[in-house]
């Protein structure tokens, strides 16, 4: 790292956040339990329309504080990238192409405390039980880093990790993703897959590693460097040949056991249901590394604002980029919470040509197999508002001509309504018909500005 570069880690982000907006972090000094308490606070606040970062100073018997809900508000994604919220998706869509190769250091803060052998015990960490239907306690913020068994390229991806003993996790590797592919190839050779599980880093690290989806030959530590704008500093693994970020809060080392399975789950998923679907892989833990004053970062699972936001933001950026390559008049893309931020998409277009709206919708459905509904509206519609989109459907769509249904498509396997992985997909063209179509009623900008001043003055 160059002398004038700032360390980008979790604690620096939290410090900057609290300094800029103290109310954005809610510190709770009162002791809470490992089971359900942390999730309950986040979900109750969500019902009140609030989404602060939650900092629990004492959780169970753990010596480590727990921070969660960092990704519960889109403003914090934008703050991490140094842009306004209105520029978040545009900015994200422009990232990922430029990579910066990581650098290896002799040591780093993550090596402050190293536990191996008999000292390894997952109960040492404040791993939470989130929902009553969960199969047990889960690491929800574990970015699992592994190397391609043939090329050595590093992959990083989020995976749920259920505690099944002092040194054992059960996990689901998402059967359509790269780590599952690694595990399949290694299992054919009866070889373990060494992994480093990273817990707690700067949001930009998460954006460029765990949340970025690229080609299987892309080194995602280098992609993370591109998102961070500086080389990611690494240290060599202690018990595995996988490097770890030097400024991570925790790193858990281990290996995916070839040919072994465990009854992992159920787990509260983004759909709002407890899913029992799992690849049932096993990770045997060989070391726990952490900073001396480490912060344990959790992600609120289930259909929380945090979990669904982590799904929506990167996919909105990806779809915006793909759609604009073919349709430059696409102005915005949104994946609404009403569609679990994963299975519905709203697309706004400026002055679409006849038929163009349906083409754009079909492109989106082909790009993301989890989507089952694509609604296209004009650029005067606020796609961040379900109400505005439904208004467009109400006043600009006729079901006999503007709705198309595709049957027996590949869909999201976590969708509880799917049929053996197959789903139907619907396109709704809610753009204005041609011809003499009436304008929306509006208020002049000057009058609106005056009204805001009056409201502020007399409220």
Image: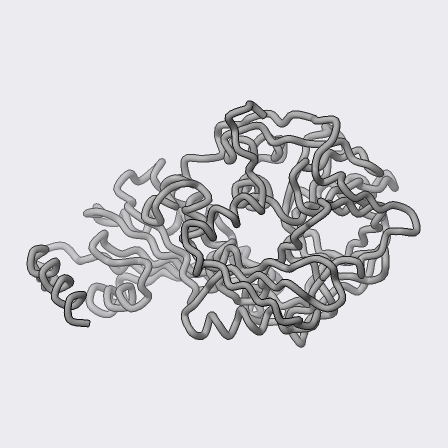
Front-most of residues 332 and 235: 235
Residue 384 picture location, percent across and down = 33, 59
User: Is 105 above or below relative to 87?
Assistant: above
Q: Is residue 268 left or right of residue 355?
A: right
User: Is 17 above or below relative to 50?
Assistant: above
Q: How many marks?
A: 0
Say which quarter of the image contains residue 218.
top right
Residue 331 picture location, percent across and down = 28, 46
Say which quarter of the image contains residue 457.
bottom left
Name the residue rendered at 59%, 25% in the picture: 1
Front-most of residues 93 and 174: 93
Q: Is residue 450 left or right of residue 105?
A: left
Front-most of residues 421 and 279: 279
**Residue 202 showing in the rendered view:** yes
User: Is 368 above or below relative to 244?
Assistant: below
Residue 371 picture location, percent across and down = 47, 57
Residue 315 picture location, percent across and down = 46, 48
Q: Is residue 58 left or right of residue 304?
A: right
Name the residue rendered at 84%, 56% in the picture: 121
The residue at the far right in this view is: 118
Specify how the rendered protein is coloured.
Answer: one colour
Figure quadrant of the C terminus: bottom left
Say which quarter of the image contains residue 150.
top right
The residue at the far top in this view is: 2
Front-most of residues 31 and 425: 31
Name the residue rendered at 64%, 31% in the picture: 233
**Residue 276 showing in the rendered view:** no
């Amino acid at each position: 790292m160059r002398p004038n570069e700032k360390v980008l880690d979790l604690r620096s982000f939290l410090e900057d956040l609290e300094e800029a907006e103290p109310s954005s972090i809610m510190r709770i000094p009162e002791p809470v339990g490992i089971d359900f308490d942390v999730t309950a606070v986040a979900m109750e606040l969500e019902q009140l329309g609030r989404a602060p970062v939650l900092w629990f100073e004492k959780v169970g018997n753990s010596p480590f504080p727990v921070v969660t809900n960092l990704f519960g508000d889109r403003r914090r994604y934008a703050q991490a990238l140094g842009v306004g919220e209105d520029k978040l998706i545009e900015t994200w869509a422009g990232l990922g192409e430029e990579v910066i190769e990581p650098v290896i250091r002799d040591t780093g803060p993550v090596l402050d405390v190293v536990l191996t052998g008999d000292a390894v015990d997952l109960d040492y960490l404040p791993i939470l039980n989130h929902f009553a239907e969960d199969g047990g306690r889960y690491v929800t913020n574990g970015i699992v880093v592994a190397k391609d068994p043939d090329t050595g390229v590093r992959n990083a991806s989020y995976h749920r990790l259920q505690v099944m003993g002092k040194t054992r996790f059960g996990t689901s590797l998402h059967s359509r993703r790269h780590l599952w592919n690694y595990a399949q190839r290694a299992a054919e050779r009866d070889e373990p897959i060494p992994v480093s599980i990273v817990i707690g880093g700067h949001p930009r690290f998460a954006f460029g590693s765990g949340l970025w989806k690229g080609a299987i030959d892309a080194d995602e530590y280098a992609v993370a460097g591109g998102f961070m704008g500086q080389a990611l500093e690494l240290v060599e693994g202690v018990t595995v040949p996988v490097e770890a970020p030097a400024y991570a809060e925790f790193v858990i080392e281990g290996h995916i056991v070839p040919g072994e399975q465990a009854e992992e789950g159920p787990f509260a998923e983004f759909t709002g249901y407890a899913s029992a679907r799992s690849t049932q892989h096993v990770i045997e833990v060989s070391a726990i590394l952490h900073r001396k004053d480490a912060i344990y970062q959790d992600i609120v699972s289930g259909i929380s604002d945090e979990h669904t936001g982590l799904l929506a933001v990167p996919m909105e950026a990806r779809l915006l980029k793909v759609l604009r390559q073919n349709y430059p008049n696409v102005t915005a893309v949104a994946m609404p919470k009403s569609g679990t931020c994963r299975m519905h998409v709203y697309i706004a277009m400026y002055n679409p040509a006849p038929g163009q709206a349906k083409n754009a919708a079909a492109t989106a459905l082909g790009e993301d197999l989890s989507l089952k509904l694509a609604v296209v509206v004009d650029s005067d519609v606020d796609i961040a508002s379900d109400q505005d989109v439904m208004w467009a459907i109400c006043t600009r769509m006729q079901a006999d001509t503007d709705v198309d249904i595709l049957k027996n498509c590949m869909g999201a396997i976590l969708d509880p309504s799917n049929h053996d992985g197959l789903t139907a997909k619907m396109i709704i063209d809610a753009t204005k018909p041609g011809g003499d179509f009436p304008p929306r009623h509006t208020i002049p900008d000057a009058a609106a500005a005056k009204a805001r001043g009056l409201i502020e003055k007399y409220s």
